[in-house]
Image (cartoon, rainbow, N blue to C red):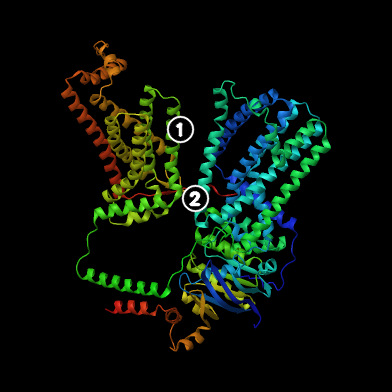
Amino acid sequence: MERVLIRTNRLSKRYGSVPVVNDLNLEVRRGEIFGFLGPNGAGKTTTIKMLTGLLDPSEGEISICDYDIRRQPTQAKALMAYVPDQPKLYNKLSAREFLNLISALYRVPKGIAKERAEQLLGMFGLMERADELLEGYSHGMRQKVVLAGALIHQPKVILLDEPTVGLDPASARLLKDILQEMARQGAAVFVSTHILEIAERMCHRVGILKDGSLIAQGSPEELRQKVGHGGESLEDIFLELTGVRENAELIKSLEEE
Amino acid sequence: MKMIIPPPLDTPPAEKSFVQDFVLLLTNQLRVTLNTLKHQRKRTFIGMGILMIVFLSFLISMGAVSYGMLKSMQPETVQGFLSLFFLVGLASQIFFGLTAAFAALYMSEDLELLFMAPVPLRVVFAVKTVSVLMSNFLVAVLFAFLPGVFCGLLFEAKASYYLLVFLSGCGLWLTGTALAELLNLLVMRIVPPHRSKEAVGLMGALAGVLIALVFQIPGMMLGSQGKLDIGAMLAGKEQLLGVMNFFPSGWASLALTSGISDSFAAGLGWNLLILIFSAFLFLIALILLERGFRQGFISISQGDGGRRRKKRSVSSVDTTNRQQEKIFFETVGQDQETVVLPASRRAGMWAVAKKDLLSLKRDTREWFGYLIPLIIMAFFVVQFLFNASASSVSSLVMVLIMYTIMFSGNLALQAFGREGESDWLLNSVPLAGWPVVWGKLTAAVLPTLLLMEALLVGTSLAVGVSTSLTLILALAAIFLSLGSSAIGLYYSIKNCRYNPDKPQMRISPSASLMMYLINFCFILILGLSLCYLFPPAELVSALRMLPPATFEWNVQSGLLGGLYFLSRPLFWPVLFRISLGILLTGGLWSLIFFGFMAATVRQSRKGFRVELVTTSSKNRLR
């Protein structure tokens, strides 16, 4: 449980002179589901893009399963999966062809890949339309294909950016179950979300990002103690810490009037 | 269904070689292309076939011309001519390759996915380079391979010569593509990701103009009646042409001329130089590309990585937001206590117009719609300047009026399709009907009218049309623009569509054709009624000579009788004739304008729907 699979050390990103992520120190251990929270524009997606190697940090280090993402990107990426908020896929491939491609890219042996693709297609209810081109899929279906692609190569680290957007309740529940099962099997799950209920119910620990800086991290219980109000929901803690409590109070007072 | 999640891997799987990864990605690229072709409609293939025939006929005519030129040249001039030809080919490859490289390396939807995969970046770039190479294939055939083949045929070269042609062609092909990729690095740096689609649109428009110009060459040659002799132009300029020998185009021509003069080894040497040079360029391009993406010098087009961000003071923004929120809620509270304010129709109209005008201003792709009439107008004006005569003044004015009408209608056709997937907005606001339609009309007419008035008045003054006629033309342009825009708006609201892949295609082709047809009828009936106001002398004298029509029950007699009946007011006293002219012109214009506007308003009240056009209905593979 203690082995750290995602580690950032003084991670920073600047666009020109504008800082987007400042001095970020994160640790996500095996078997842990880590919720990454923050208001819009806090730098969550930028952080995830740096963790996945899509963006190079301006400063700092990232290691995934002890592989430096800049120096050993191929090894790190082979053990990692990323589910973006916008499912960008090959429109002119079918779901089955797409899963075959992902398996080949992640070097899953052919026989195993075929068997696993069928299992995943069945699990996500995509079997009937598995041979249709992805351009005809709805947002939710595309999201399911991305999720299937993320699971097919047995990742040790999975990063998800707003994974429940566009999913129906049953699929969202399935996703939660999958992530919990993955964590149980020893994977590190890093979820960026706005849905605090998901974070509260599912995550072992959460980190709150504001203006590019990590202002708090710990289990929901630890955060409650930090804020000093026992029994409050994660939503209240989040609003308190991100400084939009005043707005919430204003809305509440208007509702009462 | 039982959830089966395999346990996570402890160690990464064994790495694959560059070739294995390259073959995998290339196979995938081919599968995507094959699937795209499989799901094309039949009419696309017919269109491609027609284009191919046009292209082949162009190729044959150009080939015949080039062959004829080569034949008439001195042997020492041939090398210079080939150098020039190859240079033009390299320039074309750079231009077209730049567009392809930009699309493949900056706009591909799969970049994020591929960059995330455990595949070295250089493999991704190598596969993308293959697609750029393929897009340059046709240009390479035209400007790198065929000239060599023609030379060989002309000078009856040996079979080994054609190996040199192949090698030099490949060398030039690779060099052009590598240079395009290098230049593309600069373009990717300059163009921010959120402007990439517009940049490709601009490059496409420029390519279109270039192609149109190239297709003028056979016509120009025919028009010159043998005066255009490139051989004579090049003769005596050997020193100047010698400079070309320092560049790849010169090396290729040297390789071919060596081959013709049976110095195969020398030809092979020159070809080797081109191939090494192109490999060197590719190496630099790939290294810089990889470094560019890694260091964030170039960002992936998806996301806002490359968008310029401004520093903001967080505390001040938060405070302002809170203050505004407080004011908003307080105002809402007050309104609820009193009454809900009725929506201002005029403000609504202006809001709709402003939204469209802002879209026109901010989306540079919208500007291309205005560039086309400008280019065509410029063509007519230049033609007039070269061939000015009294009759060409009137024909130029006629052309200007025709374009005013056609482009007003055409740009109004885009109005409702511009809503795209946001059509729900105008359908849900309490402004359906006149405010929305007048707003759309204002936005469609204002820019077109300004442009057309400037062109019409400017051109009229430049070609020396009298002030009174210029004023009449300016006034007429206002009414014509409004009339044809009303027609355009009606067809727009009834047939608007949106294709996410081609956001500029906002109307069905059949509706576009119908709009043009109705606009022609509009011009025809307006022209008739205007004849009563300004009777053309030639027409009046011709009509005077016509015998009185006798009516019989057949179509021909009916038509002649109708025309005779219509022509009679031309011989009425001036006052009656002009009164009838004003009445008819005003009446017909009002009928068309208000009729189409009312029909558009009726549709707007019923609600309009922008049809989403995709190929998803035909996407089953099995």
Q: Are marks 1 and 2 on the same chain?
A: yes
Residue type beneath disc 2 = Glu
Q: Residue at the location (56% across, 35% down)?
A: B46
Secondary structure under badge 1? helix
Question: Which numbered circle lies on residue B554?
Answer: none
Question: Which numbered circle lies on residue B379?
Answer: 1
| B427 horizontally vs B93: left or right | left
**Dot in front, 1 or 2:** 1
Note whether A32 is above or below A100 in the view shown. below
Q: Chain of mark 1?
A: B
Looking at the picture, how far across and down is residue A80, in whole percent?
64, 69
Q: Nearer the viewer, residue B388 or B174?
A: B388
Estimate how packed mark 1 is, as few (under 14), some (14 to 19) or many (20 or more) residues with alpha carbons within 10 Å.
few
Looking at the picture, how far across and down is residue B568, in whole percent?
22, 18
User: What residue would you read off at disc 2?
Assistant: B198
Note whether A159 is above or below B144 in the view shown. below
Q: Quadrant of the C terminus of chain A?
A: bottom left
Q: Chain of mark 2?
A: B
Secondary structure under badge 2? helix
Q: Quadrant of the N terminus of chain A?
A: bottom right
Residue A204, located in which quarter of the rendered image? bottom right
Q: Nearer the viewer, residue A47 or B192?
A: B192
Q: Does the residue at mark 1 contact the one at mark 2 (Cβ under 8 Å)?
A: no
Looking at the picture, how far across and down is residue B245, in whole percent?
72, 39
Looking at the picture, how far across and down is residue A32, in whole percent?
59, 79
Q: Residue at the location (21% across, 27% down)?
A: B581
Compute the Cα span from label 1 to label 2: 25 Å
Estimate how packed mark 2 is, as few (under 14), some (14 to 19) or many (20 or more) residues with alpha carbons within 10 Å.
some
Mark 1 or mark 2: name the one nearer the start of the chain: 2
Q: Nearer the viewer, residue A204 or A97?
A: A204
From where the camera sits, is residue B147 visible? Answer: yes
Residue type beneath disc 1 = Phe
